[in-house]
Image (tube, rainbow, N blue to C red):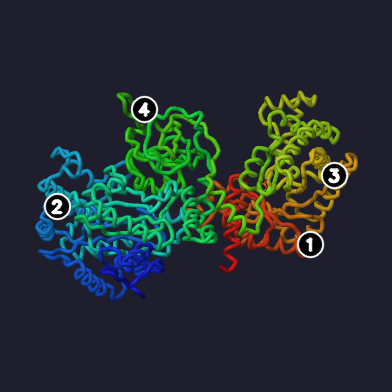
Amino acid sequence: MIHLKTFGGGSAEGRAKDKALLGGKGANLAEMASLGLPVPPGFTITTEVCRYVMDHGVGTYPDGLTAEVDAAIGQVEELAGAKFGDATQPLLLSVRSGGAASMPGMMDTILNLGLNDITVEALAVQSANPRFAWDCYRRFVAMYGEVVMGVVAADEHDEPPLDVILESIKSKHKAVRDQDLTEAALREVVAALKAAIQERTGKPFPDDVRTQLWGSIGAVFASWSNPRAEVYRRTYNISATLGTAVNVQAMVFGNLGDDCATGVAFTRNPATGTAELYGEFLTNAQGEDVVAGVRTPLGLPELEKILPAAYADLVRNAKLLEDHFRDMQDLEFTIQRGKLFMLQTRNGKRTGKAMVKVAVDLVAEGKLTQREAVMRIDPAKLDEVLHPTIDPKARPPAVAKGLPASPGAAIGRIVFTANAAEEWAGRGERVILVRTDTSPEDIHGMKAAVGILTARGGMTSHSAVVARGMGKCCVTACTSLRVDAPKKKAMFVGGGKELAIKEGDTITLDGSTGEVFLGTAPLVPAQLASELGVLMEWVDSFRTLRVRTNADTPTDARTARSFGAEGIGLCRTEHMFFQPERILAVREMILAPDEAGRRAALAKILPMQRGDFAELFRVMDGLPVTIRLLDPPLHEFLPHTAKDIEEVAADVGTTPAVITSKVAELTEANPMLGHRGCRLGITFPEIYEIQTQAIAEAAAQVAAEGVVVLPEIMIPLVMVDEELRRLRALVVRVFDGVLATTGTKLAYTVGTMIELPRACVVADRIAEHADFFSFGTNDLTQTTFGLSRDDAGRFLPAYLDGGVISVDPFVALDQDGVGALIELGVRGGRTTKPGLKVGICGEHGGEPSSVEFCHRAGFDYVSCSPFRVPIARVAAARAALAETPK
Ligand code: PEP
Ligand code: MG
């Protein structure tokens, strides 16, 4: 087992490639040190040690670790010219977490470690700044008290007790800001914090620096398993067994005076992708002040004015690191007495828009190949580029404005705590989490909310970073906002006015401008940037899988075509039945006592359906259009209210009592497994006949207009080949009849959905009668798992939270189970018909991992909702690239 690796003084034992062992932070600190960048010396205790601790219990370390840590500290002491615990030249350390995958703010950090009543005096002398020394000390005691000794708020409504102490001493001394506290007041803070720690824990704050170090190391390892880190890992599918590394590093100080600063920088703008050094800093501040959002930071251009030499170094290092890693970097730096130190670099989190622009720009700059650029795209993140924004023409007046921390627009009802967000979202509400500031404890609420609004913070504060990562609309630093979470209300103040809002009110956020609106603002569809077009051209040159869309209306079809859909893979004809002027005719059809009655009702529906299909064919000119014949359980169309029943009765010339008894007769115990799908076509062939007639007549009509029509008729829920044999014969008879009467020549195909396990098993027989298969993985998942599509949401979340299953099978295709059946079905179908066309039209057709599966399984196409078409295109390209040699 490797226990630790050292870095500093222009060399390092580790490298960037060692992320699994050293964590992202540690590996990149090593890489920066090896590149000769100014990194304070230190060492990284490995994730292997963390896994050992997880296996053996908190505080149990592998043999030999203590001696190695002592030796490594010796090396740091030499490089830093100071000694740990020394009464004249004390070495101070930072102890930070860092796993292989970045989890911003989720785990713990300790700064200024090594201070006690003796070393603090030495630091005061050495820095010639006693106030600074005591400020470091009070920060350390508070951090250690919270993180290691567990003196924290009892619940989210409580203020952290150690913060309360600081605030009360500040108000006693009339200090507005932390910096206004004098040395004497800071001494008072330290004494009060220590007393509170002793009182609450029964243990004294430790003076021994090695005790402090091991306490901190233990706390960082333990923080891997804290609840917020666990939520974060579940959200981002990070394995719980990886463990974190611990980085122990000599402190540098951004708070020694006005020639000191601390900040964060992105080598490109993380919201837009524009190539500019972008970031924030605070002078005379330490570590977490910038990200914590306590003081409002300055933009980097100000740094150039205040500390030009350090700024020039930062610009140079930023370029060097971006070129070295060939990706946008997210940097942390500290300037101590005018000298720049680099504390972290990592690939920067970015919005979907920035992801596309940076990838395309890096290719233009010759830093990436097109292939690498496509592999850098997270298909799911394209969602953000494709989503609506607030209509600029109908923009209501904003009631407040903050920083545009994460773009997009969100409309939702206000909640004030993370728990409330989770609770309301669980009830199906769209909520906006409104907080004074978010902390990592709020992660579950941020996940549940559609948008986040905070009074404090900046572009790089916790809420901004986390929201951007989640692709959620977020507005921070909305300074006119006053939140009173316990009373479930808030206020926007300004211009002598106050505007009250309360829990449950609806607001709209614009994450691209930082504006806040009361009520619901009108939205417009996404505007696609030119870079997306460039990227998509590369994507299309790599992919072999075709991407169609599920669309039932001409509007959806048009949107999908503009997103690059190559046809319609599923038109659910029943969606056309729900329009108010049609539903009555549909009800008449269902409730008719006999075939003649059904035919009379169908005759009313026929012209409407014909019109729908004709328009779809026109929009999809030259592309295939798969139309599915009626599928849903009939009960979905039944009248339920007394008024509906009376209406239908009057229309078909009977009494409400007759209709009521017919409704009772049609009600099924398990409609999803009942009289639906092609079972309707078998029992009421006239329904499928009329639908086929509408399709064929529309095709003939539109073909006569010169449109290239490629109709594909699809039969749902086939369980035995005989169903398909009969229904195919029916379709062919009706379709050919129409073509003959109209004298039209056009080719059409007849295929089937495969959405039952039995159909997968006997696919070879079913294929005898099919020109194509389209896997309906919604029903196939439902029937394979024996899980109701409509009710699983009540208990599946418990399965996910408890880790019984790792992903919702209705979201990402279950490749082991459902996938195995699909492979069986494809094999069976192509045994009978080697060239059988195969696609998917369940919701999985737009989910990246499922699309990749379809590529590997030899599908011809996937079909998904219009907004997911670009996502599927990227996923298809990545799947193709993954299997071709570079
Ligand atoms: C399916 O079952 O996957 C499918 C596409 O059909 P529906 O969702 O309409 O049942
Ligand atoms: Mg289905």
Q: x, y (%) of residue 187? A: 12, 50
CA separation in Å, label 4 and label 2: 42 Å
User: Where's residue 685, x and y in %?
Assistant: 83, 42
Give coordinates of residue 687: x percent, y percent: 80, 40
Query: Which marked residue is nearer to the observer: mark 1 or mark 4?
Result: 1
| Sooner in the amino-acid sequence: mark 1 or mark 4 | 4
- Pick the residue in front: 844 or 476: 476
Q: Give the SS element for disc 4.
A: strand
Label 1 sits on a secondary structure element that is loop
**What is the total number of numbered labels drawn onto the structure image?**
4
Residue at the spot of label 2: 134
- Tell me, yes or no, if residue 761 can be seen here: yes
Q: Is residue 790 left or right of residue 644?
A: left
Give the residue type that dot 3 points to. Answer: Phe
| Element carrying mark 2 | helix
Mark 4 — residue? 500
**What is the distance, in whole Å, between disc 1 and disc 3 at their CAs?**
23 Å
Q: Of callouts 4 and 2, which one flags the residue occurring earlier in the amino acid sequence? A: 2
Query: Can you identify the residue that label 3 sits on?
Result: 735
Marks 4 and 2: CB-CB under 8 Å? Answer: no
Asked whether residue 227 is in view, the answer is no
Q: Quadrant of the C terminus?
A: bottom right
For the point 28% across and 63% down, which residue is it?
A: 39
Instruction: Tell me if 703 is positioned left or right of 796 in this view.
Output: right
Whichever of labels 3 and 4 marks the residue nearer the N terminus, that label is 4
Q: Residues within 10 Å of mark 2 (few under 14, many from 20)?
A: many
What's the CA distance linking mark 3 and mark 2? Answer: 88 Å
